[in-house]
Image (cartoon, rainbow, N blue to C red):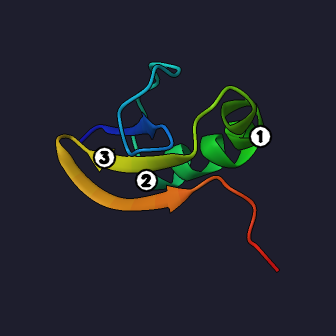
Amino acid sequence: MAWSWRYEGTNGESVDGPDESFGSQADAESWIGQIWRELAASGVTSVALLEDDRVDYRMSLLPVAE
């Protein structure tokens, strides 16, 4: 199984991002933890973790409103 991230913009549309593939969910999550600030600065507002073609979960990169 291959794990990867799909990058989404403000309206949920796909946007360009690094084309990375990982051997495990843990590797994918560790990587996103290191790069999410760069992605957010480039206009990515959310990401979806994919296992092959199946979406495992989505996650916002926007700051939480207080």
Point out the residue furthest to the front here.
Answer: 11
- In the rendered structure, which disc, 1 or 3, sits on the residue that comes first in sequence? 1
Relative image position of residue 17 (x, y in whole percent) = 51, 22
Residue 22 or residue 66, whichever sits in front: 66
Helix, strand or loop at disc 1?
helix
- In the rendered structure, which disc, 1 or 2, sits on the residue that comes first in sequence? 2
Relative image position of residue 11 (x, y in whole percent) = 41, 44
- Splitting the image into 4 quarters, where does residue 62 fall? bottom right
Q: CA distance from mark 2 to mark 3?
A: 9 Å
For the residues bearing labels 2 and 3, Cβ distance under 8 angstroms: no
Residue position marked by numbered label 1 in the rendering: 37
For badge 3, the amino acid type reads Leu
- In the picture, the quarter occupied by the N terminus is top left
Q: Nearer the viewer, mark 2 or mark 3?
A: 3
Relative image position of residue 18 (x, y in whole percent) = 52, 20
For badge 1, the amino acid type reads Arg
